[in-house]
Image (cartoon, grey):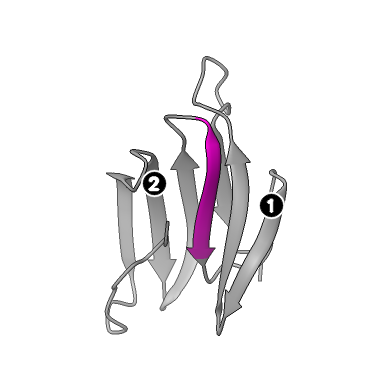
Amino acid sequence: MRVFPAVPSKWQNVEYRDLRCEGAHLVSAKRVDGKTQSFELTAVKAGDILIKTDIVGAVGKKMEVVAKDGVFTTYRVNMRKRGDAPDEGRLTWAWGG
C-alpha cells in the first residue's frame, strides 16, 4: 500500500479519508508542502501489510523495514483485524521531523 500513489508533484497539499486500498483496508492521509504528514490505516482483516511512505520511523507498532527507494521506505507490519477496542486494528503514523 503506497500512501500517496501517483500524486503529481504540483499537488503540494492533499488530504483524503477512508479510501479502500488493496486488501479492502481503509486508509486516510494528509500531505502538506509536498511531504506526507500523517496517515491512518484500519485493517478489516488480519495479516501482514506492506506500507510505502516518505515518513521515517514507526510509531506504536512493530515495523520491519523491507526496502528503501530514494526518499521512500517500505515497511511490513502485522495488523490485527479491527475489533471492539478503539485502537485495535488501527495504525496511526505522524511525521516527527
> Does the CB distance between marks 2 and 1 fall below 8 Å?
no
Q: Is residue 44 above or below residue 26?
A: above
**Mark 2, other Cα within 10 Å: few <14 / some 14–19 / many ≥20:** many
Start and end of the magenta stretch?
46-52
Q: Is residue 87 left or right of residue 18?
A: right
**Magenta stretch: includes residue 56:** no
Q: Secondary structure at mark 1?
A: strand
Instruction: Identify residue for label 1.
Output: 63
Q: Earlier in the sequence, mark 2 or mark 1?
A: 2
Of the residues shown, which amino acid type is indicated by label 1? Met
Q: Secondary structure at mark 2?
A: strand
- State the image coordinates of residue 19 (x, y, percent, origin top left): 29, 46
Instruction: Identify residue for label 2.
Output: 27
- State the image coordinates of residue 9 (x, y, percent, origin top left): 32, 83
Quarter of the image where one finds residue 10: bottom left
Q: Is residue 17 left or right of residue 49?
A: left
**Quadrant containing the N terminus in the rendered view:** bottom left
Q: 61 or 37: nearer the eye?
A: 61
Q: How many marks?
A: 2
Q: Is residue 29 left or right of residue 60?
A: left
